[in-house]
Image (cartoon, helix red, strand yellow):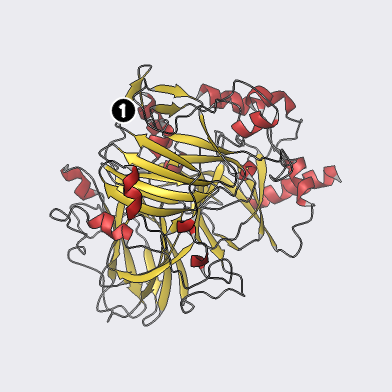
Amino acid sequence: MAAAAAVAAVMVVAVVAAAASAASPAAAGESTREFRWEVGYMTVAPLGVSQKVIAVNNQLPGPVLNVTTNWNVRVNVQNNLDEPLLLTWDGIQMRMNSWQDGVAGTNCPIPPGWNWTYQFQLKDQIGSFFYFPSLGLQRAAGGYGPITVNNRAVVPVPFAQPDGDIDVFIGDWYTKSHVELRKMLDDGKDLGIPDGILINGKGPYSYDNSLVPEGIQHETIGVEPGKTYRFRVHNVGTSTSLNFRIQNHNMRLVEAEGTYTLQQNFTNLDIHVGQSYSFLVTMDQNASTDYYIVASPRFVTDDHRWHDVTGVAILQYSNSKGKASGPLPDGPNDFYYKSYSMDQAKSIQMNTTSGAARPNPQGSFKYGSINITQTFILKNELPLRINGKRRRTINRISYSPPETPLRLADLHNLTGVYKTDFPTIFNNSTPKMASSVLNASYKGFLEIIFQNNDTDVQTYHLDGYSFFVVGMEYGEWTPDRRISYNKWAAVFRSTTQVFPGAWTAILVSLDNVGIWNLRSEKLDNWYNGQEVYVKVADPLGYNITEMIIPDNALYCGLLKNLQKPQIHQTSDKSSAHAADRWSMRILAMVC
């Protein structure tokens, strides 16, 4: 963490610049919403062991970012952690504006004690997403929260208005701190079996006294009989795929990361790390007791300890006659049906008869007839030793982040920060650590094949874009596999799973200039180098197509001397009121 400390030492908060830019007019005719968040530690014991977690406004999960298509958004972030911070917006597409992406390749981090304002306009999108801290395994300590992007009033939703909206965060959890987990990875160790699975930041309901000790606080979701609720479910864990189910209730899938789906009922669904889904659930049971909400591990070893880490919450009708008891509802048994989860995933398709962000049907974009301009075949493998360290790779490259963000280096014509020599196809070259970037052509139509030669499920996410998941099969991908692609109703999302010994193919229209992070959503793999940046260069030059660098940009690495002197906060209080008072003082000084 020496590099992080060095970065923190040279950077200051851009409060003055943020205040000045906040006065700039929003895009004509669009609404603007402003949020003020404090990110800091609080002590909780979700699994019975007291530990510091990362909270937003003293909440875990954090407050909802509730916005509407095309709105302008400003999020003022006060970093009360003891280490640098960036927040990233999983699935949110910022048009031509990777400056606000919140990852190390595009932004200098907010140093401890400092403040920064994210400013961006949403693209034409709707749906269920989440934000989280992107640096150094911080998401393993919390810091996440929901993003809901609503339809504009002129665009109808393809189902009746639900009676309520419920965010559910599921994820594996360790009682070790994220700092300790980082040290384990730095020492070449595996993180091992998690200590539990949390639901909305809380431990499991005591469904079995031998597995769940007394005193564990669990999540209870209260509902009214006969009502229908929209459950927005997000897997924000470290590395474990989870199966989600609600006892005795059908879950009608209606949306996946911004795409309205062909509606179908599930009794359970595998949700992989980084993925989000929306279900409509009708309270049609007799409420003789409460009901279990379960998130259980998938694709894990036979180690008996995995049976001890199931997440359990309670669905409670207002007229419930008693507590839930007895065995949990069974998850999928695919011992004899190895393709169960893949077939389930392939059944999720776009609802081509409804609009999403725009009034016209989603299916009017005939992606299946567009000529592919570039193909990247990206293969991951089992962990490799590189320079004596245990690392993860894509195409035998383990990404090594430079201290200067790539986008800043480009703007200032710095050479030697990174190379655009990332191999677009796997070869048996010697594995290496490098700051290597994929070059892609603006306005091109890109085919990416993820080939998983590991024994675990992988999940990949591409910032700045959604993509069509057109195919997935076991075995090695070859060009003749294209004949099996779904060329009409493939789900359009930003995160996809790749099963062990299998491939997944996606198609993406490169309409968003910038440098965008393509990464493993499994935090340990990401930390160990399983990522790459995709450079979609502006053919017309800087400040023609792409958004210009924000006035409040922070500088670090080779550009640290460009950072303007700022005034930093002296108050050690961690309250929204303190932040308000500080912002008012700065504004008074500016004016």
Residue topped by disc 1 = 189
Q: In the image shown, does 201 or 260 lie closer to the viewer?
A: 260
Question: Where residue 321 sits in the image (x, y, percent)?
Answer: 27, 78
Going by the image, does 146 lie left or right of 460?
A: right
Q: Residue at x 39, y 25 (%)?
A: 186
Amino acid type assigned to the residue bearing label 1 in the image: Lys
Q: In the image shown, does 584 or 43 lie closer to the viewer?
A: 584
Report how many numbered discs are placed on residues in the image.
Answer: 1
Q: Residue furthest right?
A: 591
Q: In the image shown, does 14 or 381 lie closer to the viewer?
A: 381
Question: Where residue 243 sits in the image (x, y, percent)?
Answer: 29, 56
Going by the image, does 55 lie left or right of 284?
A: right
Whether residue 205 is visible, yes or no, is no
Q: Residue furthest left?
A: 336
Question: Where residue 138 sits in the image (x, y, percent)?
Answer: 47, 39
Q: Is residue 31 above or below residue 45?
A: below
Going by the image, does 234 lie left or right of 314?
A: right
Rendered image quadrant of residue 156: bottom right
Going by the image, does 205 lie left or right of 97?
A: left
Q: Badge 1 local density, few (<14 within 10 Å), some, or many (20+)?
A: few
Whether residue 437 is visible, yes or no, is yes
Helix, strand or loop at label 1? It is loop
Rendered image quadrant of residue 431: top left
Q: Residue at x 40, y 33 (%)?
A: 425
Question: Where residue 2 sits in the image (x, y, percent)?
Answer: 52, 22
